[in-house]
Amino acid sequence: MNWHNDSQLESLRHQLVNHKLYQLLDSPKTISIFMQHHVWCVWDFQSLLKALQIKLTCMEIPWIPSPDPLTRRLINEIVLGEESDEDGIGGYLSHFELYIKAMKEIHADTKSIDEFIVSLRAGTPFEEALLKSNAPPSIIPFVTQTVKLAQSGALHCIAAAFTLGREDLLPDLFLKILDKTAEEFNVSYSILTYYLNRHIELDGDEHGPMAISMLD
């Protein structure tokens, strides 16, 4: 199957990019509510990434070289950017941590996701930590499916979800919404704007082509 020209994939992508949800993001309040949900997608994306790194490189001791040096290089380059990217002020953060900072900048509620991370750090099993966090009910099946895929899915399914289902669906459209609401309500989205611009830059020039090469 030539997925590059698959009409079903293009149709699904079109539906996502043109989803009616975006029309509702017309104020700082609605953007804040959106981010309280979307942050979970930012978090579980990292699990897909780590699953690929585990499957495509050697993450064990004693170390042995994985079979494909090019794919090994590609996934480690993506991990470098996603786990420890430039934060715009001379330091480094994961994209997840940068998104949390962006939420706090506009006073979006981070309590649920913060409590979830604290629970995971304490060794609480994923499902229990998710339920204890009081996460938005709508995200629970989505995040659960992603983590299950990352934990036990076939390599090609994880790679497809990572490459085709996430990275480049949001930034361009979201930036236009931010520009409009920032001017209308006189608010600053400086950290979120930086986050989105980094995604556009990395996805267009580096991560996007790398992920596609990996899927091929």
Image (spheres, rainbow, N blue to C red):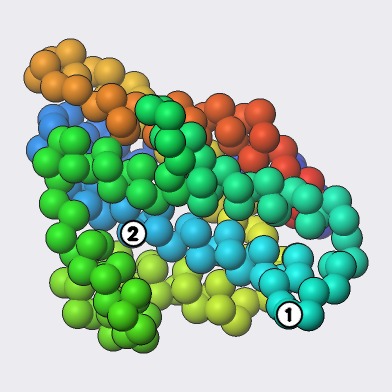
How would you rate the neighbour count of disc 2 (Cα within 10 Å): few for under 14, some for 14-19, many for 20 or more?
some
**Quadrant of the rendered image containing residue 206:** top right
Residue 82: x %, y % from top left = 53, 48
- The amino acid type found where label 2 is placed reads Trp
Q: Are marks 1 and 2 in contact (CB under 8 Å)?
A: no
Q: Is residue 17 visible?
A: no
Q: Nearer the viewer, residue 61 or 126?
A: 61
Q: Is residue 42 above or below residue 22?
A: below
Question: Disc 1 to disc 2, how far (Cα)?
Answer: 31 Å
Left or right: 183, with 208 as reference point? left
Q: Label 2: which residue?
A: 40
Residue 212: x %, y % from top left = 73, 45
How would you rate the neighbour count of disc 1 (Cα within 10 Å): few for under 14, some for 14-19, many for 20 or more?
few
Identify the image quadrant of the N terminus.
bottom right
Residue 2: x %, y % from top left = 80, 50
Q: Is residue 144 visible?
A: yes
Q: Nearer the viewer, residue 139 or 105?
A: 105
Q: Residue at x 47, y 73 (%)?
A: 147
Query: What kind of element bears circle 1?
Result: loop
Query: What kind of element bears circle 2?
Result: helix
Q: Residue at x 45, y 48 (%)?
A: 94
Q: Is residue 95 above or below residue 129?
A: above
Q: Label 1: which residue?
A: 61
**Quadrant of the rendered image containing residue 23:** top left
Q: Residue at x 20, y 73 (%)?
A: 133
Residue 168: x %, y % from top left = 53, 39
